[in-house]
Image: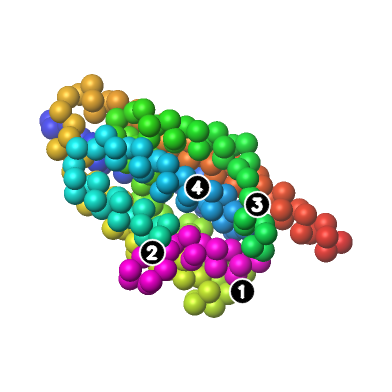
């Protein structure tokens, strides 16, 4: 019997973990949405200015390196297709969801999110470059693949009473993420895993990155529930 394809194994494991993450699957409250956007502002910067540069420094595949630098550019500098950086879209989404610029500029990571950031950074800097690549793209794969989850634009329209134009961050990313992660984007992985030991190491790195993802979303959900309690108390 042929060994199961390593990419299938990654995809199946990631989806199984994702389905058990409450923030992703439970009803989206205003507080949980705002908490996500705040903590994701920090994660977005970490992904493209720390983690991606760290693992591409060890990546032997120049096509992957170029594509990833292109992605970093789209995130932080300019996405030529829309003449804007994704960080701007994210800020705009934050304003549409009721966050102030002051809140978004002064945000700091809650403890579980900070732990996740440290785990991811360590993977990107020290583990196999493929584990680093996975650590920076597993979430994109999950969101592009799961059917029902809180990244769907419709969920945000309903929770915040927004128009389709106001949730562009989410409609745009559902498409962009399919290009960045998943079976097709990850196909080169097979070419670079030459031994069982290397393959096992990459899978361990992938699982560690997903454990950190669980922590990230726990931190976001806890912050969101706290913000939601604050809102209902101030309403009296
Ligand atoms: Fe983006």
Residue that carries the numbered disc 2 in the rendered image:
78
| Residue at the extreme front of the image, as rendered | 77
The residue under the point 83% across, 60% down is 234
Mark toward the viewer: 1 or 3: 3
Give yes or no for residue 92 being in the magenta stretch: yes
Magenta residues (range): 79-98
Q: Is residue 52 left or right of residue 217?
A: left
Front-lying residue, 183 or 132: 132
Q: Earlier in the sequence, mark 3 or mark 2?
A: 2
Q: Which element type, helix, strand or loop, lies under badge 1?
A: loop
Asked if labels 3 and 1 touch by Cβ distance under 8 angstroms, the answer is: no
Mark toward the viewer: 4 or 1: 4
Using the rendered image of the protein, determine whether residue 15 is visible from the camera's viewpoint: no
The span from disc 2 to disc 4 (Cα, nearest Å) is 18 Å
Residue 222 horizontal/vertical position (percent): 65, 45
In the figure, 134 relative to 63: above or below? above
Q: Earlier in the sequence, mark 3 or mark 4?
A: 4
Residue that carries the numbered disc 3 in the rendered image:
106
Mark toward the viewer: 3 or 4: 3
In the figure, 75 relative to 131: above or below? below
Residue that carries the numbered disc 4 in the rendered image:
43
Is label 1's Cβ within 8 Å of ligand 1?
A: no
Other-residue count near label 2 (Cα within 10 Å), few / some / many at <14 / 14–19 / ≥20: some
Residue that carries the numbered disc 1 in the rendered image:
161
| Residue at the extreme right of the image, as rendered | 236
Q: Earlier in the sequence, mark 2 or mark 4?
A: 4
Give yes or no for residue 82 being in the magenta stretch: yes
The span from disc 3 to disc 4 (Cα, nearest Å) is 14 Å
- Colour mode of the rendering: rainbow
Q: Which element type, helix, strand or loop, lies under badge 4?
A: helix
Using the rendered image of the protein, determine whether residue 151 is visible from the camera's viewpoint: yes
């Amino acid at each position: 019997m042929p060994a199961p394809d390593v990419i299938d194994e990654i995809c199946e494991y990631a989806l199984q973990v994702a389905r058990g993450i409450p923030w992703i699957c439970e009803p989206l409250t205003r507080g949980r949405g705002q908490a996500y956007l705040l903590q994701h502002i920090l994660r977005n910067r970490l992904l493209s200015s720390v983690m991606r540069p760290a693992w591409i420094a060890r990546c032997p595949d120049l096509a992957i390196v170029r594509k990833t630098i292109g992605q970093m550019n789209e995130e932080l500098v300019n996405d030529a297709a829309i003449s804007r950086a994704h960080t701007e879209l994210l800020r705009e989404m934050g304003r549409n969801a009721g966050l102030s610029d002051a809140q978004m500029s002064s945000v700091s990571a809650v403890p579980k999110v900070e732990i996740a950031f440290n785990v991811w950074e360590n993977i990107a800097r020290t583990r196999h470059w493929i584990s680093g690549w996975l650590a920076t793209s597993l979430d994109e794969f999950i969101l592009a693949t799961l059917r029902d989850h809180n990244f769907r634009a419709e969920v945000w329209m309903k929770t915040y009473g927004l128009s389709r134009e106001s949730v562009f961050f989410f409609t745009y990313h559902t498409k962009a993420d399919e290009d960045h992660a998943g079976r097709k984007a990850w196909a080169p992985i097979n070419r670079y895993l030459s031994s069982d030991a290397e393959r096992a190491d990459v899978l361990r790195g992938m699982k560690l990155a997903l454990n950190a993802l669980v922590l990230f979303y726990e931190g976001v959900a806890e912050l969101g529930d706290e913000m939601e309690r604050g809102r209902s108390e101030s309403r009296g």
